[in-house]
Image: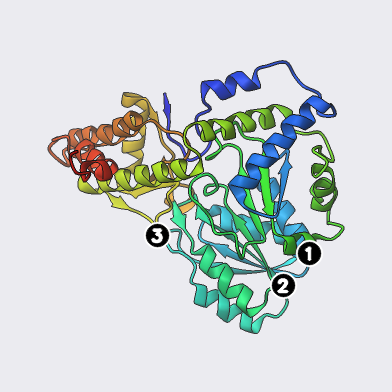
Amino acid sequence: MLLFTPGPTPVSQNVRNAMSDETMHHRTPEFEAIFEQTRKHLFNLFATDEIVMLASTGTGAMEAAVINLCHKTLLSVNSGKFGERFGKIALANGLKNIEIKNEWDTPVSVDAIVEILKTNSDIDAIAVQISESAGGLRHPVEELAKAVKEINPKIMIIADGITAVGVERIDVSNIDCLIAGSQKALMLPPGLSILGLSNAGIEKIGTGKGYYLNLASEIKKQRQNTTAYTAATTLIIGLLEVLQTIERQGGLGVLYCNTARRAKATRAALEAIGLHIYPSTPAKSMTTIDDPDASKIRSSLKEEYGVNVAGGQDHLKGKIFRINQMGLIEIYESLWVVNSIELILHRMGRLEYAGIASKVYNETYFKSALEKKEI
């Protein structure tokens, strides 16, 4: 079965091998050396002033960010299930929450953020997804963060990059907390989350809030290459192998370029056979299609072609399907997916099969190579 869901993503054999070695105690020089190496790679990936790893899913990191960086009122952007989650976290922890709510295909307006800030001086943190995976939407987070910092540099910008870190280069100049999760572009099992923090964010954290999710205690310990509580040793060992694999295969620049080419080629291929891209500003992490036959296409992909893609949630259940673009994906696997979809549409009587999806995918992905002059 080809796993093309936008998390969890496939775990490669070399990473599984690395994680299957003998169990290592987290309070040993041997593990501290692994922890130190992993942190160095993560600083390169995040480009932030500090890095913290937590033994939790991405939701744990979201809660840690909110309780440590928001002391009064959170402004949360809700264009999907995960934007909605930020607001619920704030309220569950006794904080006030002001929500900007849009349809799941609609990015937040920077002007709307600015207008709310003009009339709400208690807002001290803003939480937004870079890539809202409920609908495959890309928010203008960098522009938003810049505009906010020009109004009040003390407002903390919390950016959920769970389906963005490892997908594209993110400008963190005005971001105070960038969140990632292990089971997305980092190609690991679930259970490890990472926060990249700015110096301003560290100052705002101070002595920290909460107990297990107290970021101050974690910063102190992790600068010593250990953790405040039990580390997710196996996942951190796997993470180091993932990051080293990315380096061996050309580095982050190559990874970002290949992901962008794959996302563009998949969109072009599916549009060429008459399908519609759901979000107005698509994220590079996934390709989201809205279609009246979404459920049938999704089930046929799984049952007949061995491809598992994700469906929609809530009001989009049965109305969309989402194809993952994160991680190290072989080109022939992506071609299999788009060609399978064209075959399914043919059997539904919606088109005459002509191999158009594969042709357009190849032309789009390899366009730069096709345009090279002969030597």
SS of the residue under disc 3 = loop
Q: Amino acid at mark 3?
A: Thr
Circle 2: residue type? Lys
> How busy is the neighbourhood of tag 3: few (under 14 within 10 Å), some, or many (20 plus)?
some
The image position of residue 140, as x and y in percent, is: 49, 64
Which dot, 2 or 3, sits closer to the camera?
2
Is 316 rendered above or below residue 310? below
* Relative side of 216 to 147, left or right: right
Single out the residue that lies furthest toward the front.
375
The residue depicted at 36 percent of the width and 42 percent of the height is 262
Left or right: residue 14 compared with residue 342? right
CA separation, marks 1 and 2? 9 Å
345 relative to 38 in the view: left or right: left
* Element under disc 2: loop
Say whether disc 3 or disc 1 marks the residue closer to the N-terminus: 1
Question: Label 2: few (<14), some or many (≥20) within 10 Å?
Answer: some
Residue 227 visible to an observer of this rendering: yes
Q: Quadrant of the N terminus?
A: top left
Secondary-structure class at tag 1? helix
Residue at far top of view: 22
Q: Are marks 1 and 2 in contact (CB under 8 Å)?
A: yes
Image position of 277 (left or right of 239):
left
Q: Quadrant of the C terminus?
A: top left
Which label was assigned to residue 204? Answer: 1
Name the residue located 52 percent from the left edge and 38 percent from the top edge. 7
Q: Which residue is mark 3?
A: 281
How is the structure coloured here?
Answer: rainbow
Amino acid type shown at disc 1: Lys
Residue at the disc numbered 2: 154
298 over 281 or under it: above or below: above
